């Protein structure tokens, strides 16, 4: 097929998010791997991407975005992942909890809680959807915290309380991580910590943990999304394992688009 109708209808544009995001790096890799000639991955932010997506869908126009779940966009719009026969975006991803070296010795109670933290996509969706519907992130996290005391109790069970020790969590302002980090702040506060959360660009989040500027984060997407950061920092951080399983990244389009695979972007 020598027609480029699909590519032209998309203006040869993949609508990306922040430049540091793993899904943007993988999308750039997909342009190479699938030889998506002329395509560019436009970088912006999660908010700009979802707003472009909403506008396109309102007008039933073609659009392809860097997507991931957990994310509220799948609840709000009819969307599909494009098939990825070359496996550029990996299979299922897990979201891991990562601490700085030495945190276990310095704040064993916090590490116990962080290591116990494990929830599901459905749990996270409740906070994310509230925020998307206009709730303040801290308030949305608090509502979930209040309504899910059984889960909070599992994560804090048998953990000794501390007396106002300061701990800092780093994150990136992706919707999923805004939800999880705001929740973990409350959980750590419930055992007596004073918790500071700071939003950074992705590689700075990893760097902050590796250089002891921040104590922990719940925002590491592995094995594929943050493979570059993992390779760079694995010797200088501690991986406490997954806090959520079955995440995914990929290229996402509205259901009404008549394509099914990344390869079709060349049509
Ligand atoms: N995300 C959400 C991030 C990880 C969490 C998929 C946009 C990324 O691509 O790095």
Image: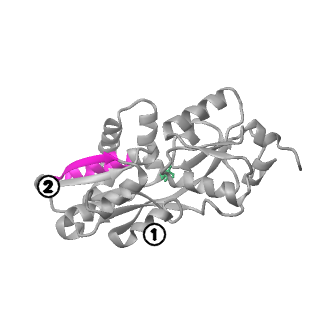
Q: Is residue 42 above or below residue 92?
A: above
Q: Residues within 10 Å of mark 2 (few under 14, many from 20)?
A: few
In the foreground, 27 or 59: 27
Q: Is residue 74 left or right of residue 196?
A: right
Q: Is residue 117 above or below residue 66?
A: below
Residue 82: percent from the left, percent from the top? 69, 51
- Ranked by sequence position, the earlier of labels 2 and 1 is 2
Q: Residue drawn at (49%, 51%), measured in percent from left and top?
A: 21
Secondary structure at badge 2 equals loop
Farthest residue toward the top? Answer: 59
Return the residue at label 1: 231
- Magenta segment boundaries in residue numbering: 179-199
Say if the magenta span includes residue 97.
no
In the foreground, 133 or 3: 3
Residue 240, by quadrant, is: bottom left
Q: Residue drawn at (75%, 40%), measured in percent from left and top?
A: 257
In the foreground, 32 or 47: 32
Say if the magenta span includes residue 181.
yes
Farthest residue toward the front? Answer: 38
Q: Residue drawn at (54%, 50%), measured in percent from left and top?
A: 69
Identify the disc placed on residue 165.
Answer: 2
Residue 105: percent from the left, percent from the top? 19, 70
Q: Residues within 10 Å of mark 1 (few under 14, many from 20)?
A: few
């Amino acid at each position: 097929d020598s027609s480029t109708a699909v590519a032209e209808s998309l203006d040869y544009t993949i609508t990306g998010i922040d430049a540091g995001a793993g899904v943007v790096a993988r999308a750039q890799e997909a342009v190479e791997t699938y030889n998506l000639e002329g395509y560019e991955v436009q970088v912006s932010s999660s908010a700009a991407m979802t707003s472009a997506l909403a506008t396109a869908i309102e007008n039933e126009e073609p659009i392809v975005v860097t997507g991931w779940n957990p994310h509220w966009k799948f609840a709000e719009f009819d969307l599909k992942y494009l098939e990825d026969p070359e496996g550029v975006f990996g299979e299922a991803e897990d979201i891991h909890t990562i601490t700085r070296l030495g945190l276990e010795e310095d704040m064993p109670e916090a590490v116990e809680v962080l290591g116990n933290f494990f929830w599901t996509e459905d749990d996270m969706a409740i906070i994310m959807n509230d925020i998307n519907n206009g709730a303040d992130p801290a308030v949305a996290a608090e509502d979930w915290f209040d309504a899910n005391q059984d889960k909070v109790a599992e994560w804090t069970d048998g953990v000794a309380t501390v007396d106002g020790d300061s701990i800092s969590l780093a994150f990136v302002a992706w919707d999923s991580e805004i939800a999880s980090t705001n929740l973990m702040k409350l959980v750590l506060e419930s055992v007596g910590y004073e918790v500071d959360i700071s939003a950074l660009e992705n590689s700075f989040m990893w760097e902050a943990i590796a250089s002891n500027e921040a104590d922990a984060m719940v925002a590491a997407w592995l094995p594929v999304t943050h493979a570059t950061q993992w390779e760079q920092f694995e010797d200088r951080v501690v991986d406490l394992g997954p806090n959520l399983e079955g995440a995914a990244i990929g290229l996402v389009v509205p259901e009404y688009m008549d394509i099914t695979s990344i390869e079709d972007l060349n049509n």
